[in-house]
Image: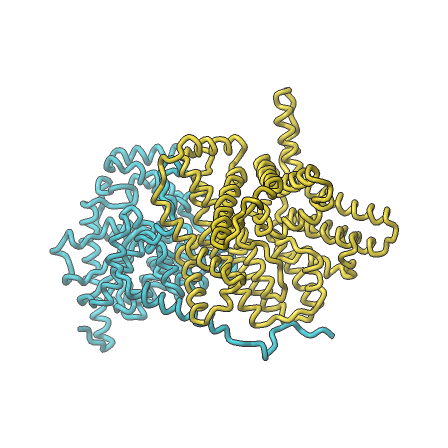
C-alpha cells in the first residue's frame, strides 16, 4: 500500500475518520490494528517477524527494568541484538553473502543450493528492527523507562506512517506521544495536509519524472556519454532526495493529522558545505542512530585520531550495508567513510584556510556546498549503479567523453521540475523555518497550494510508483 | 478518564488558504483548460502518430467548435472507433451528403462503449437529431480498459460504469475508476495527455535517443488487453496467408496487432458491462429525442478463423434487443452492402472502395431514421424545424 496509491488514500481517509472519535486506549488499539493491516497489505506473511521483534523487545525491556545485575542486563540487551540483527541478517543479508560466497566458490567448481541464494526481503525490516532495537538499548542505558503496555510498545514499533521507510523514531521521542492522550487540532490537520501535498509533489512530479532519465542512462545496456552520466547523476541526486524526503514528508503529514509529531529526517542536505554537515542533514534518523548506537559504542572520537578514523570508516561502511545487500552499497558507505575521515584529517588545515570577512566566508561556504554536492554525487553514482563493473563503466564514460553529446534539451525539464522545489525549499531555508510556507500570507499560501496541486495533476506520474527506500 | 482526541469545536477553523487554493484550481480548470485554450490549436500540435493515445483531442476540438457555432439541421452524430474513422467519409460522396455541416464525425481510435457513453453526455447539449453507432462484437466483447484521456470525462458515465460493474468490479478497478472520476472533476487531469502531447510534456520528459531508450512503443496501449490470449501459430499462418493475398503491402504490422485484438475478444462480466454502457448511451439519446442507428461494422472475411461466430450471435441479439425500443434502427451486415476482401486495408479497417460503400449505406439508413423520427414526432404532436 504505497503512500501515493488510491488504496492508501482510502485507508487513511478511513483511519482519519474513525481514530479521532475514539478515546486514547481505543485509539491506540485501532491505530495498531490499522498499522498491521497496512503492513499485511504488503505481505501478510512477514507480520510474524514484526510480531517477533515486538514481543522479544517488549519482554526484554520489562526484564531490563527488573534486572539489577549488570551481567544479566548485558545478557538481555545482547539477546535483543541477536534477535533483531539475526532477523536482519537472515532476511536481508543471507542471500547477499550466499551469492558472494557462491561467486567465490564458482572458480573451484563448487556451488550452493538455489534456496540459499533466494531470500525474500520483508518490506521495512531495516527500519523497524533498528527502531525496536534502539528501545532496548535505551532501556539498558537507562535513558528510557520500560513500557508497561504491550499495546503502546507495539504501536511504537508498528505505527504505520513510519513503519516501512522511517523516520527511525527513538523511544524517547515517539513513545511518550503514544502513551499520552492526543488532541488533533485544526492547525495540525492543515499543516499535515500541506506536508502530504508537498511530499506527493516531490515524489510524483520531481522524483518520478527524473527517474525516467536516470533509469535510461543507468540501464546496463545503455551507452551514455560523459555529460549524460553527469546530468543523470545530478538527476539521481534529486530523485533520491525527493523520493525519500517526499516519503518522509507524507509520513510526517499523515502522523501529524493523527496527532503525532515524527522527527525531521532531512534538512536541505544539498546545502551542506561539508560531508560531515551532509550527514547532519541527510536521513537524520539513520545517521543519528548510527552515531548513538554504533559510532559512540565503538569508541567515537575518544581513542585518538587513528581509532576515530577507524570508527568513522566502520560506521559508514555498515551504514552503506544497511542500505542494501550489495557491494555497490558497501562501496558507497566506504566512500562516505573516506570523505568523513578526510574531512577530519583536514579540519585543522581547513580552519586555517577559512577566510574571515562575511563576503569571503559566504563565498567559501558556497564553494564548500558545490564541492560537497559533487562529492555526494560521486557517491550516488556508486549507489545507483547496478554493479561495481557498471559503476566502473559509468566512470569510464565520464572520463572518456567529457564534453561530447551534451543533451541541451534536458535542461528545460531539469529546470522546470526543480525550480518549484528550489523556490519553496530555499525560501524555507532563508527564513530558518522548515515549514515557513504555513506562515506565509493567505493569498500567497493559496497560490502555492494551488500551484503544487496543479503541478501534481498536470505533471505528476499517475498513482503508485514505488518509493526507492522501500527496497532497503 | 482520558478525553477523546477528536477536534474540539473551539479548534475547528476553516482552512481558508486550502479552500482558496481549491477554488483557484477549479476556476483555472474551468476557465483555462475548459475555455481559453483553443482545441484547434492544441489538436494541431499533437503529432498524428500520437492521436491514437489522445484521441479525444479531436472530439474536444469538434465539441468546442460546435459549441461556438451550432451546426446545421438535421444534426447527425456518427460515433465509432478507428474503424469508423477509416470507413465513414461523407466528404468522399458529396452527392449522398445531408445538408452541409450537418454530419458530426466523432470517430477515432479507442472509442469503446465507456468512451461512447461518456461522449453521448457531451453531445446531448447539441441536441442531435440522430446518432449513429458503428459497432460489432469488437465493441461488446472486448476487455474493459479505463483510460481517462480517451473519454469525455463524464461523471454520469462513471456512475453508469459503477452501476454496470457492481461493488466487486468497483474495488478491483478502483484506480481506473478514480482516474475516470478525477477526469470528470478536473479538465486539466482529463486532458493532460493531450496537453502533454501538445507541448506540456517538454516540461517533464527528457528526450532520449535510441542509445538510451528503445523507441517509444506508442502502440503498446493497443496491445495491452490482447496479451492474455496469444494467437496459435497455425491460425496465425492462415490469417497471414489471407491477408497477403488481399490486403495491401505494408499492412503486416496492423494485421499482427489486430490478430491479437480479435483473439482477446471474449465473453464474461466485461461483455455485460460493455453492453449495459451501450444500452444506456442509446437510452440517453432516445430520452433526448434523438433517433439512433446501430450500424454493424464489417471485418475482413479472411480474419473469420480468429472470430468465435457465437460472439457475433451475442452482438446481434443485443442489437436486436435495443431495436425493440422505438427510435432505434439496427442495420446488420446482411442488410448492408457486400464488402469484398480487397476492400479492406487490414483485418478491421475498410479501404476507400469499401468505405465508400459503407458511407453510402450508412447515410441511407440515417435518412430513413430521420424520416421515421419526423413521423413519430408528428404523431406525438412535436413540430420539427
Which residue appears at 39% of the width and 69% of the height?
A: B24
Q: Is residue B103 left or right of residue A370?
A: left
The quadrant of the picture occupied by the N terminus of chain A is: bottom right
| Of the pair A357 and B25, the residue shown nearer to us | A357
Which quarter of the figure has residue B105? bottom left
- Taking depth in this image into account, of B196 and A147 the one nearest to the observer is A147
Whether residue A91 appears in this view of the structure is no
Question: Percent position (x, y) of residue B289?
Answer: 28, 70
Chain A tint in image = yellow
Query: Which residue is situated farthest in the right direction here?
Result: A69
Residue B300 lies, in percent from the top left, at 28, 42
Quarter of the rendering occupied by the C terminus of chain A: top right
Q: Nearer the viewer, residue B311 or B225?
A: B225
Identify the image quadrant of residue B40: bottom left
Which residue appears at 32% of the width and 70% of the height? B287
Residue A438: % across, % down: 51, 67
User: Taking A321 as reference, is B129 left or right?
Assistant: left
Residue A98 on image: x %, y %:
65, 32
Q: Residue furthest bottom?
A: B10
* Residue B34 in view here: yes
Q: Residue furthest top?
A: A108
Q: Is residue A289 left or right of residue B48?
A: right
Query: Residue sitting at 66 percent across and 64 percent down?
Result: A30
Considering only vertical position in the picture, is B327 above or below A336?
Answer: below
Chain B tint in image: cyan
| Among the 4 quarters of the image, the one containing residue A230 | top left
Count the marks: how many? 0
Amino acid at each position: 500500500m504505497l503512500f501515493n496509491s488510491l488504496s492508501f488514500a482510502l485507508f487513511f481517509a478511513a483511519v482519519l475518520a474513525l481514530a479521532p472519535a475514539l478515546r486514547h486506549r481505543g485509539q491506540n488499539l485501532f491505530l495498531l490494528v490499522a498499522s498491521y493491516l497496512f503492513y499485511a497489505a504488503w505481505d501478510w506473511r512477514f507480520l510474524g517477524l514484526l510480531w517477533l521483534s515486538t514481543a522479544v523487545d517488549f519482554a526484554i525491556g520489562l526484564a531490563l527494568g527488573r534486572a539489577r545485575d549488570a551481567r544479566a542486563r548485558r545478557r538481555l540487551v545482547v539477546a535483543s541484538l541477536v534477535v533483531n540483527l539475526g532477523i536482519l541478517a537472515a532476511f536481508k543479508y543471507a542471500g547477499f553473502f550466499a551469492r558472494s560466497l557462491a561467486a567465490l566458490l564458482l572458480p573451484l567448481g563448487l556451488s550452493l543450493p538455489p534456496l540459499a541464494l533466494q531470500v525474500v526481503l520483508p518490506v521495512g525490516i531495516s527500519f523497524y528492527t533498528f527502531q525496536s532495537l534502539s528501545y532496548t538499548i535505551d532501556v539498558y542505558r537507562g535513558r528510557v523507562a520500560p513500557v508497561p503496555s504491550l499495546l503502546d510498545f507495539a504501536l511504537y514499533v508498528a505505527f504505520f506512517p513510519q513503519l516501512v521507510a522511517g523516520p527511525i523514531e527513538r523511544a524517547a521521542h515517539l513513545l511518550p506521544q503514544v502513551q499520552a492522550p492526543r488532541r488533533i487540532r485544526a492547525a495540525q490537520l492543515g499543516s499535515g495536509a500541506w506536508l502530504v501535498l508537498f511530499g506527493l509533489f516531490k515524489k510524483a512530479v520531481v522524483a518520478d519524472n527524473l527517474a525516467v532519465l536516470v533509469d535510461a542512462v543507468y540501464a546496463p545496456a545503455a551507452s551514455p556519454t560523459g555529460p549524460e552520466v553527469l546530468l543523470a547523476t545530478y538527476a539521481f541526486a534529486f530523485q533520491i532526495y525527493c523520493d525519500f524526503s517526499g516519503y518522509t514528508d507524507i509520513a510526517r503529514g499523515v502522523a501529524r493529522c493523527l496527532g503525532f509529531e515524527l522527527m525531521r529526517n532531512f534538512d536541505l542536505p544539498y546545502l551542506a558545505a561539508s560531508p560531515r554537515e551532509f550527514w547532519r542533514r541527510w536521513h537524520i534518523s539513520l545517521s543519528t542512530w548510527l552515531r548513538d548506537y554504533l559510532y559512540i559504542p565503538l569508541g567515537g572520537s575518544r581513542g585518538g585520531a587513528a581509532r576515530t578514523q577507524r570508527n568513522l570508516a566502520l560506521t559508514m561502511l555498515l551504514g552503506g550495508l544497511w542500505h542494501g545487500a550489495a557491494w555497490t552499497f558497501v562501496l558507497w558507505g566506504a566512500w562516505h567513510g573516506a570523505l568523513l575521515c578526510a574531512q577530519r584529517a583536514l579540519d585543522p588545515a581547513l580552519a586555517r584556510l577559512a577566510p574571515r570577512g562575511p563576503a569571503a566566508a559566504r563565498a567559501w561556504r558556497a564553494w564548500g556546498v558545490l564541492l560537497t554536492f559533487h562529492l555526494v554525487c560521486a557517491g550516488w553514482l556508486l549507489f545507483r549503479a547496478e554493479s561495481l563493473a557498471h559503476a566502473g563503466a559509468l566512470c569510464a564514460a565520464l572520463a572518456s567523453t567529457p564534453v561530447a553529446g551534451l543533451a541541451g534539451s534536458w535542461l528545460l525539464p531539469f529546470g522546470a521540475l526543480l525550480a518549484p522545489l528550489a523556490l519553496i525549499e530555499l525560501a524555507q531555508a532563508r527564513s530558518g523555518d522548515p515549514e515557513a510556507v504555513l506562515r506565509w500570507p493567505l493569498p500567497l499560501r493559496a497560490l502555492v497550494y494551488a500551484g503544487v496541486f496543479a503541478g501534481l495533476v498536470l505533471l505528476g506520474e499517475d498513482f503508485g510508483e514505488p518509493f526507492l527506500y522501500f527496497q532497503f | 478518564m482520558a478525553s477523546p482526541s477528536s477536534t474540539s469545536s473551539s479548534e475547528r477553523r476553516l482552512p481558508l488558504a486550502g479552500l482558496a487554493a481549491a477554488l483557484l484550481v477549479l476556476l483555472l480548470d474551468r476557465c483555462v483548460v475548459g475555455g481559453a485554450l483553443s482545441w484547434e490549436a492544441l489538436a494541431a500540435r499533437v503529432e498524428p502518430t500520437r492521436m491514437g493515445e489522445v484521441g479525444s483531442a479531436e472530439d474536444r476540438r469538434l465539441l468546442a467548435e460546435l459549441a461556438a457555432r451550432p451546426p446545421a439541421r438535421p444534426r447527425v452524430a456518427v460515433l465509432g472507433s478507428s474503424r469508423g474513422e477509416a470507413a465513414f467519409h461523407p466528404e468522399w460522396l458529396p452527392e449522398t451528403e445531408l445538408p452541409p455541416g450537418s454530419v458530426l464525425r466523432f470517430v477515432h481510435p479507442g472509442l469503446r462503449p465507456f468512451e461512447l457513453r461518456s461522449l453521448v453526455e457531451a453531445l446531448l447539449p447539441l441536441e442531435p437529431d440522430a446518432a449513429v453507432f458503428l459497432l460489432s462484437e469488437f465493441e461488446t466483447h472486448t476487455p474493459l480498459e479505463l483510460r481517462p484521456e480517451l473519454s469525455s470525462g463524464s461523471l454520469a458515465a462513471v456512475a453508469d460504469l459503477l452501476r454496470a460493474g457492481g461493488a466487486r468490479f468497483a474495488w478491483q478497478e478502483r484506480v481506473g475508476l478514480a482516474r475516470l472520476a478525477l477526469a470528470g472533476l478536473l479538465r486539466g487531469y482529463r486532458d493532460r495527455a493531450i496537453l502533454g502531447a501538445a507541448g506540456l510534456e517538454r516540461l517533464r520528459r527528457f528526450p532520449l535517443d535510441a542509445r538510451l531508450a528503445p523507441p517509444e512503443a506508442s502502440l503498446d496501449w493497443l496491445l495491452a488487453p490482447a496479451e492474455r490470449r496469444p494467437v496459435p501459430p497455425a491460425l496465425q499462418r492462415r490469417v497471414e496467408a489471407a491477408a497477403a493475398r488481399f490486403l495491401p503491402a505494408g499492412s503486416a504490422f496492423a494485421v499482427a496487432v489486430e490478430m491479437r485484438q480479435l483473439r482477446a475478444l471474449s465473453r464474461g462480466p466485461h461483455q455485460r458491462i460493455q453492453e449495459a454502457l451501450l444500452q444506456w448511451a442509446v437510452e440517453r439519446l432516445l430520452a433526448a429525442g434523438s433517433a439512433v442507428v446501430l450500424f454493424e461494422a464489417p471485418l475482413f472475411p479472411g480474419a473469420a478463423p480468429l472470430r468465435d461466430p457465437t460472439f457475433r450471435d451475442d452482438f446481434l441479439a443485443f442489437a436486436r434487443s435495443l431495436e425493440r425500443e422505438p427510435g432505434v434502427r439496427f442495420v446488420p451486415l446482411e442488410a448492408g452492402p457486400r464488402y469484398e476482401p480487397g476492400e479492406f486495408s487490414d483485418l478491421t479497417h475498410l479501404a476507400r472502395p469499401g468505405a465508400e460503400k459503407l458511407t453510402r449505406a450508412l447515410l441511407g439508413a440515417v435518412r430513413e431514421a430521420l424520416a421515421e423520427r419526423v413521423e413519430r414526432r408528428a404523431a406525438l404532436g412535436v413540430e420539427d424545424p
